[in-house]
Amino acid sequence: MCGIAGFIYADRNRPVDPETLVAMAAIQYHRGPDGFGWRAMEGVGFSHARLSIIDLDQERGRQPFVSSDGNLMLTKNGELYDYQRLRTDLSARGARFVTKSDSEIIMHLYPRLGIDDTLPHLRGEFAFALYDREVDTLYLARDRFGIKPLYWAAIDGGLVFGSELKVLFAHPAVTRKFDAAGLYHQLMQTMVPGTTAFTGVHQVRPGHVLTVRRRDGRLQVEERRYWDIPFPEEDARGKPVDETEYIEGVRERLIEAVQLRLEADVPVGCYLSGGIDSCAIVGMAAASTQGSVKAFTIGFDSDDYDETPIATEMAEAAGADQEILRLEAEHLYDHFEETLWHTERTIYNTLGVAKLLMSRRVNETGYKVVLTGEGSDELFGGYPAFRRDMFLHGLDHLSPSEREKWEALLAENNKLFSGAMLAEQSVEDAALTSKVGFTPSCLQPWLASSAHVSALLHPEHREALADYSPGAAIAATLDGDALRNRHPLDRAQYVWIKTMLEGQILTWGGDRVDMANAMEARPPFLDHHLAEYAAMLPPSMRIHGRTEKYVLREAMKGLLPETLYKREKFAFMAPPAHTDPKKWEAMRNLARRHLNPHTIDAADLLDAKGVEALFRLHEAPDTTAATQTQLDAVINHLIGVQVLHQHFIANDIPAQARRKAAELGWHIDQPQPGTTENNRYAGV
């Protein structure tokens, strides 16, 4: 697990500045503190900051990799599983491996299969850049769910890429400026897939490969999808089988996914909350290793949000060695600015701060790898928004009285999440309803919060977005063919996977705050073999009556304590600011620093009068708790865009990156990959 960076110039003869490559590696030192490397050839340069997980030999495993004939160059972030089987097969076909690294299999698969037939063989979480000098083409590929980040930006006469935005900004030719629509989406929480807050800076979308061909002094850029979550059309799902077959199918695939992700040359721990997802992972990890597993738990000082008692019950049942990090609500804002340096986007809840502090604790205890429960809710219908959409749009046969009963039950069960994970009042967006068939409940709270955004924008941005529709922008990125004729639950899960999973859970709730402390998180539930099986399950196996994640509960029944087996879904999140006077004051102190008229005027992003009016609305005596929760999120975003401006626009990032390289002692004269005999590739 590492950080990657690089660029390609349209002119093959344009010099590549190695100091820029080293600076791009250094500014993401937190992703890979165990070493760095850089290579360049004919207007193309790659660099790499390494976190040693598999093949700890610092010389042999150092990237970028270059083939023995000098034709291929690779830099990769992430982990590939089941690679030992592929190594055996490739070796039988004449491939000569010179490292133990999982990354090396790409160097052997690609020459034999090409990029399109290589990608289906890659199992795990990854982002990589591969340059083929023979066809003068650069490939930027990202894993199926977007677990690992990968950004790119076109510059004058070239293209720059990297694992983080700050890596791109370390290249002096990359523009550092807020995009009006990107700013809008930062304030409303939900991003348009493939975009960022900054002008001209894009993400390689999950399950996609970006192909950059150099032709006649120009770059031709094409992005295409190689995988999508395969929810079937309703009449193509097949005849239902006995539920025990589904239960066993989930169990078998999940056990395999966990066992594959336990492989490492360093110790592997687990995150453990009070949900069945992480509890199931801890239980299976303990069973697979037949020993004590290290389990890391976050505890909050609010009974409504603290899950440590249930997590402790699971740790004791599994014989796990539990480490609990107890956090006080008001102190989370002490680390808010630091967290945004790593997330590079705004966050609506201080859960991201808590996760950053937890990854620091994991690092301090000597662990580099943990297994996590992310992805379970996406595959098995765990979020309250899914249940709401299934019952409102998928049970047309219910009588009016039955529907009224279910709606009352949903309202009661979801009270804690109103204003955050669920909208206080139903929101209808014409473009999303046209594309999806209804406006997904998972997007409704953020569409509701967007009603506040226009008044908060600087007049220049407000004017530029006068006719802008955030729902239409999101809808335009969704594949209508993948939604057409699908069950409402499938459609709701599909939209969440394309928006909230990649744009929130796997970024500011996952990779970015984990890798901030050189800690690799592995989510077994997002193994694509398991995901493809889960997509074929009948909706009733995911949400069965009032029980969400039914098939997973049954698959894990013998592994979970009864309390967990019977427990309803509780979304893991930090207490909103308004729920605690000390936390509210901590947020207000941060707001006084970043949202005062002087700092607002200096950044030219927001309208000071609009910000002041929002605070008045929040503190009005007739404002409901759900509305306050929604406004807490908006205030976090307001503070966030100001902090992002300070981090990435006001500061000189290229100079900062070079200073970091000097501080680390990383310089261009150090031995680089491929310069010693034991690191030369042969047989590729």
Image (cartoon, rainbow, N blue to C red):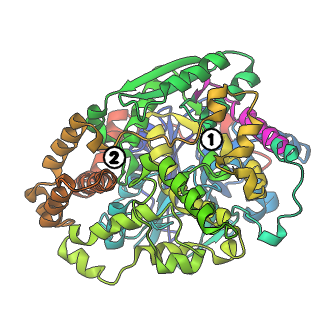
Q: CA distance from mark 1 to mark 2?
A: 24 Å
Residue 146 numbered mark, or none? none
At a point 24% along the width and 76% down the height, the residue shown is 462
Residue 272 found in image quarter: top right
Q: Position of residue 571 (x, y in %)?
A: 50, 43
**Image point 76% across, 45% down: which residue?**
682
Q: Give the residue at mark 2.
A: 341
Estimate the x, y position of residue 605 in percent, counting from the top left: 21, 66
In the image, which residues are magenta?
248-270
Return the residue at label 1.
523
Q: Is residue 21 above or below residue 54?
A: below
Q: Amino acid at mark 2?
A: Trp
Q: Residues within 10 Å of mark 2 (few under 14, many from 20)?
A: many
- The magenta stretch spans residue 257: yes
Q: Amino acid at mark 1?
A: Pro
Q: Helix, strand, or loop for circle 1?
A: loop
Q: Residue at x 83, y 46 (%)?
A: 95
